[in-house]
Amino acid sequence: MSNSSTTHFTNPLTFILMGIPSLETAHAWISIPFCTTYVIAILGNFIILFIVKREPKLHEPMYYFLCMLAVTDLVLSTSILPKMLAIFWFNSKEILFNACLMQMYFIHCFTVIESGLFSAMALDRYVAICHPLRHSTILSIPVVAKIGLAVMLRGCTVTLPYPFLARRLPYCQTNIIPHSYCEHIAVAKLACADIRVNNYYGLFVVFAMMGVDIIFITVSYVLILRAIFGLPTKAARLKTFETCGSHLCAILSFYIPSLFSFLAHRFGHNVPLSFHILLANVYLLVPPMLNPIIYGVKTKQIRDRLLRLFIHKGT
């Protein structure tokens, strides 16, 4: 093991994931909230899928997008947590080179897909509030399916170069990744070659994909708020705004941690590495846990169906 981390090589058979550097002694304690987060994410998202499938009244565009988000969250969290818990619990730090590239692809791919789904859900809220009479016509089931497919294809294609960009690099001196998962730049930094292409492409994906999504969501909600404030009564304004509450909370829980992580990674040179890694974990692991909770609490139809389910089981 020690030889693999010091000898020169071009194509390493394995990488060594360090988990959270400088906090190795606390890995067992850190694993408790992470494992809890994962269990809640798995249960919550499966419950969302189950409720939407069983309740015909929820067979609407908003809930179809919510199901797509739930599947995305399940894949995203499962791409990270099992290996991370293996590091924390069993000190199983080795990951095969190809497995590392595969994890890298899934993480970045489904992060972009999740961002795209938030844009699609913002579009749904805009049409529902600004053009309510045409909602079922504009966002018919075939249109929703096409939007979902487009979001998935965009995420799959735009992140496809990541593993190829990482594979082409020659690696030397160390195969130790100071991270808890195979993040693109964290892997590329191990190379003994110029990684500017990797850096530039990573920035392109962030600004051209997630940046455009943020702009689209912002414009959508400006138009939504303008329509809401144009309603005649305060009660009508509050009732309409409540339909957007869950979506806004989910958006903030996804973009705010990811923005802080991006800024800390690019500009926080004096920030401890352990804080970087913790922040990178939070922005990928917390939204999959929070999304089903947010939609379960804020969305009356889901909340009522869940209550009926438990009451029925109790009787």
Image (spheres, rainbow, N blue to C red):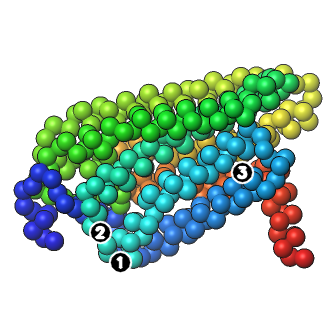
* Residue placed under numbered mark 2 in the picture: 93
Q: Tags 1 and 3 in contact by the CB under 8 Å rule?
A: no
Q: Amino acid at mark 3?
A: Tyr
Instruction: Mark yes or no: residue 273 visible.
Output: no
Mark 1 vs 3, N-terminal side: 1
How many discs mark residues in the rendered view? 3
Q: Residue at x 19, y 60 (%)?
A: 13
Which residue of the protein is positioned furthest toward the left in this rendering? 8
Mark 2 or 3, nearer chain start: 2
Report the front residue among 290 and 55: 55
Residue drawn at x 28%, y 36% as measured from the top left: 199
**Above or below, comparing residue 277 to residue 225 in the picture:** below
Q: Position of residue 98 (x, y in %)?
A: 28, 55
Residue tagged 3: 295
Residue 16, position as x, y percentages in the image: 25, 63
Residue type marked 1: Phe
145 over 246 or under it: above or below: above
In three-dimensional space, the C-alpha distance between marks 2 and 1, rounded to whole angstroms, equals 8 Å
Mark drawn on residue 90: 1
CA–CA distance in space, label 2 to label 3: 36 Å
State the residue in front, 222 or 55: 55
Image quadrant holding the C terminus, namely: bottom right
Residue 44 vs 138, above or below: the answer is: below
**Label 1 crowd (10 A; few <14 / some 14-19 / many >=20):** few
What residue is at 25 percent from the left and 44 percent from the top? 166
Q: Quadrant of residue 164?
A: top left
Secondary element at image label 2: loop
Q: Residues within 10 Å of mark 3 (few under 14, many from 20)?
A: many
- Secondary-structure class at tag 1: helix
